[in-house]
Image (cartoon, helix red, strand yellow):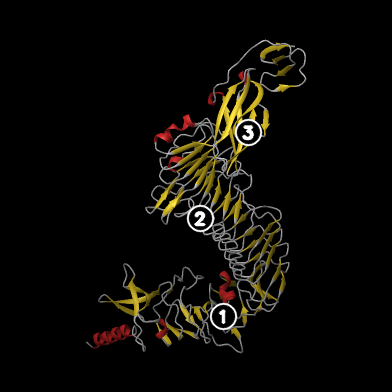
Amino acid sequence: MLNNMVKKILLFLAVLTAFNLQAVTFKGEPISGTSNCRIVGIAEDHASVNGDLNIPMSLYINGRVYQVTEIASGALNDFPNVTRILLPGSVTNIGGLTESFKKGPLYNFFGCPKLKEFYVASNNPMFSHNSQGLLLKTDGKDLVRCPQAVSTENGTLKVGGNVNAICEEAFSEVTTVVRLEIEYLRAVSYNGGLNSCVNLASIRINNDVFLHTNDDVLIDHTGVLMCFPPKKVLGSYTMPAEVTEIYDFAFANTMYLSTVIFNNNVKKIGPYAFYKANLATVNLSSSVETVEPFAFSEMPRLTTIVTRGDLTELPAGFAAGCPNLTTLNFQKTQPSKLGNGAFKNCTSLADYKFSAATLMGDSVFYNTGFTEVVYGSEAPVQEAARNGYYIFADCKKLARINLSAINCENGQFTLPGKFAPGCPNLTEVEMARNTYIRMPNQFTENWYTFGESCALKKIIMYSFECETFRPAFHWGKGGTAKPNIYILRNGLGADAPAPTDKLCAGDQYTTVKPIYYYESVRPAPSYSTGNATFYIPGGAMEFFSEALDAGAYVEEFYRFNPGTEPDGSLSVALNVVFPDMVKLESMKVNEETFTNLPDNNNKVYTGIPAQYVKTIEMNYSVFGVPFTTTYSEGDFSGVETVVADGDSVPAEYYDLKGVRVTTPSAGNIYVEKRGSSVKKVLL
């Protein structure tokens, strides 16, 4: 009877601990299949908790008592007035840190600037504390967490006892430690938060068997530089010859360091190695082979990055968030792969050698400072290695993209979805000569290549294909959009696709009436749309009847009327319909070029026998965009052969292709033109 009474009292007291002296109400969730639970937070405002935060041994959840064995990730962060945290014997898992995963972070106890000590019940099988209030593993060797406001001797923390390893994030946000002294150190996990120990200026290891210090800089016995203290007062640092690798966060948050001189032995730079460092220039030695994600991210003063070796791949977040970065100097090798967000939010970056041969991840140049993006002539990467999305998204200054130089002889250039959305000043785009406009899948909403409400006014396209279920260009925010779209297919072949019928769209508040300027005499299949305007070459009206039937407005740039003169030679009557739009430059008949073309119903007399005319090529510009329209024999009529006698005038000779020959050679067949007489002769 007495024993039952004692058990009930103990159970009551255990539950009562959930409501400590300040009546903190802990929130928990049961762990499936057990009588245990994890703490997921507290009900009160964290700022209302002062002094001790006493973690309970058990919680009462849904009418049942559960033993507290875990603290969930992020459950106990941001207690600005807590000075001590007490852990019961039952808690063996904090944020995933368990006996089987010994070096990971706690993901708890951040944002506790007044925290001076941890206290752990003596029967806890996983955690313990020492006289300095440090949170340790139960054997006292692994330092799990140092309180942010730990007591020191005039800024010096001498870690005593058996501590010989520092776990991940152990010193994060610690403000009171200026000098750290440890007797013996065998391991540091992911920098141990040392470079987030905001006032740390010096590290000293008394027994340097595994890790040692060189001028207050922590280096391990294999040559890995582990930590350059963030508040170490030194402007320029020359890396010792023993250093072959720079560890995670090793130079992060360094305040006074402005220059790092790399030795020629460093081969690897770890993640976040220079995160938020104050360097103005990064000058990598030729020995560097690997740089890991976010190595040079969020550096506020960084303006220049120089690489001297074969660094062919830049990782995710390589220099992301560097607002003053303007210069990238790849002295030996241009990177062939850029990881996700490599230069994201580098708002001053406005110069880069763009290449279709470079494989780009998502958001590589997101929110950068480019006003113009021009790709070089390199062939695109293989389709199997696709570029990511959002590559130029949110580039506020970007006004023009030109992809026309890309070499597409052996394949298409694939333009990914969301290539450049959110660019309010992007008004002009020129595509590659063979483009595939890709969308993720037919079920994805609003993945238009240039955003849901693009600002494009001028689009130059060649041969292209796009997903049948999603238009490539989309306008929104109401009103009427009248984009000028130039379709330049001349010389690409009759089968070169250009399906303009599904190219443009608008939201429910926006009417889109595209204006198409066609270079070729004949349109590609699937071109017609009734709400559009088509300007086309002279003599091409019959080939655009489908657009006329759909109700589109169709008009020729110029009138084009070839004919035969009495002497049998070709003449072409030209009349520019829109002189403010179109400027004629030259006409090429077979291989002979004629300039100073008339623009008002005047003829060009070619002097070339009409029956030998195979092609007529018109060169002109439309609002400054160069056009070349080629007419083949099936595209024009009215050229007839006229033969007459007349030997009293000098003869002119042409080869069988219609090219004039000034000095004919004996033994060859020519076309002889003498006055109005045209005939073949053997000289």
571 is higher (above) or lower (below) than 35 = above
Residue that mark 1 sits on: 162
Towards the viewer: 611 or 124: 611
Instruction: For residue 227, say whether it is visible.
Output: yes
Tag shown at residue 234:
none
Q: Residues within 10 Å of mark 1 (few under 14, many from 20)?
A: some
Kind of residue indicated by mark 2: Tyr
Q: Nearer the viewer, mark 3 or mark 2?
A: 3
Tell me if 9 is positioned left or right of 597 in this view. left
CB contact under 8 Å: marks 1 and 3: no
Quarter holding the N terminus? bottom left
304 is higher (above) or lower (below) than 24 = above
Cα separation between marks 3 and 2: 48 Å
Image quadrant in which you'd find residue 410: top right
Kind of residue indicated by mark 3: Pro
Residue that mark 3 sits on: 598
Residue 73 point in image, percent of width and height = 43, 72
Residue that mark 2 sits on: 390
Query: In what element is the residue under mark 3?
Result: loop
Image quadrant in which you'd find residue 249: bottom right
Q: Nearer the viewer, mark 1 or mark 3?
A: 3
Q: Nearer the viewer, mark 2 or mark 1?
A: 2
Quarter holding the C terminus? top right
N-terminal-most mark, 3 or 2: 2
Instruction: For residue 506, say whether it is visible.
Output: no
N-terminal-most mark, 2 or 1: 1
